Amino acid sequence: MPMYKVRPFQGGPDSAVLAEHLPTCMYRVRNVHRHLQGGGSAAATVSSSPQDEVDPSLQALESRQDEILKRLYELKAAVDGLSKMIQTPDADFDATNIIHADEHPSLTVNAADLDTLLGKDYGALKDIVINANPSLPPLSLLVLHSLLCERYKILSAVHTHSSVKCVPENLLKCFGEQTKKQSRNEYQLGFTLIWKDVPKPQMKFSIQTMCPIEGEGNIARFLFSLLGQKHNAVTATLIDSWVDTAIFQLKEGSNKEKAAVLRSMNTALGRTSWLVGSELTVADVVAWCALQQTESTNAVPANVQKWLKSCENLAPFNSALKLLK
């Protein structure tokens, strides 16, 4: 049996029933604001015309919102256009391009590669600014500065922030005697170290546009990548693992953790000359500095002791040792 039974409708086109306006919404609610402002009763009958229910103030608000959204869209389009015109560090230097080679190339970088890495084609000196606490000097960053000086023309400077009362003389001269004989545009890279009361090292590459990179290990990775050394994904992951191990376990860990890391290093160095493969990497730099700063170089396994001497035979490591005396 059907739920509803409707009588057949019979009527001509002039029928009043056919002229009935079908509703466009399920429920129709009166405009309370219009009735109250006009002094009418709140229980007034609802108008049958939808146009009568639109409040002029709401229409003005809607028009204003549309205008704001339009201006925001135009502003976004203008910013997108400017971002394509202005060269940023991400466009000048792409760190992802250094992990695709399967072999271990030399650290030597030709002049064309240096221009590409540092954006010399755009005629701008790239500035590296590092804030570090003199009570915990980032030794690995000083070693990397020396390595970079062997391959770049660097304008180096050391400053002291007002938050630090006293800085040892050897830290003030950690870059040696700096004499500026040329203008800034003659250099490829600016390297500024500021001794400041900060919990951990902070670095900016291009001061205006880049967020700070924090932590000695992260900064060391970035600086070493400027040397142009390339690795495949597996080797790059292994290097990163050694860097984190050196920072968080060898340098900041317990005695038990340090002993475990030394055993792992001894095993790895029994197979290769350096921690990862046959070439010096940032893992060697960070691990060597961590050992020096923890004063654990005397009681180390044989392979680690041999590796320490190999590091110290290189001039950048040897000059960094003078800062610890």
Image (cartoon, helix red, strand yellow):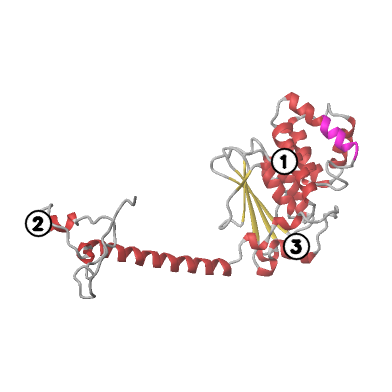
Residue 12 visible at all = yes
Of residues 309 and 86, the one nearer the viewer is: 86
Q: What residue appears at the point 83 percent right and 47 percent down from the top-left corner?
A: 280
Image quarter in which the C terminus is found: top right
Write down the residue under mark 2.
40
Answer whether labels 1 and 2 touch (C-beta < 8 Å): no
As measured in the structure, the alpha-carbon distance from the residue carrying label 2 to the one carrying label 3 is: 80 Å
Q: Which mark is residue 95?
A: none
Residue range corresponding to the magenta coloring: 263-271
- In front: mark 1 or mark 3? 3
For the point 66% across and 63% down, which residue is it?
Answer: 92
Q: Which mark is residue 139?
A: 1
Q: Is residue 101 above or below residue 82?
A: above
Instruction: Give SS at disc 1.
Output: helix
Give the residue at the far top of this rendering: 256
The residue lying at 79 percent from left, 47 percent from top is 234
Q: Residue at x 57, y 70 (%)?
A: 85
Task: Give the residue type that dot 3 points to.
Answer: Leu
Badge 1 or badge 3: first in the primary sequence: 3
Pointers 2 and 3 in contact (C-beta within 8 Å)? no
Apparent side of residue 226 relative to residue 37 in the rendered image (left or right): right
Residue 114: mark: 3
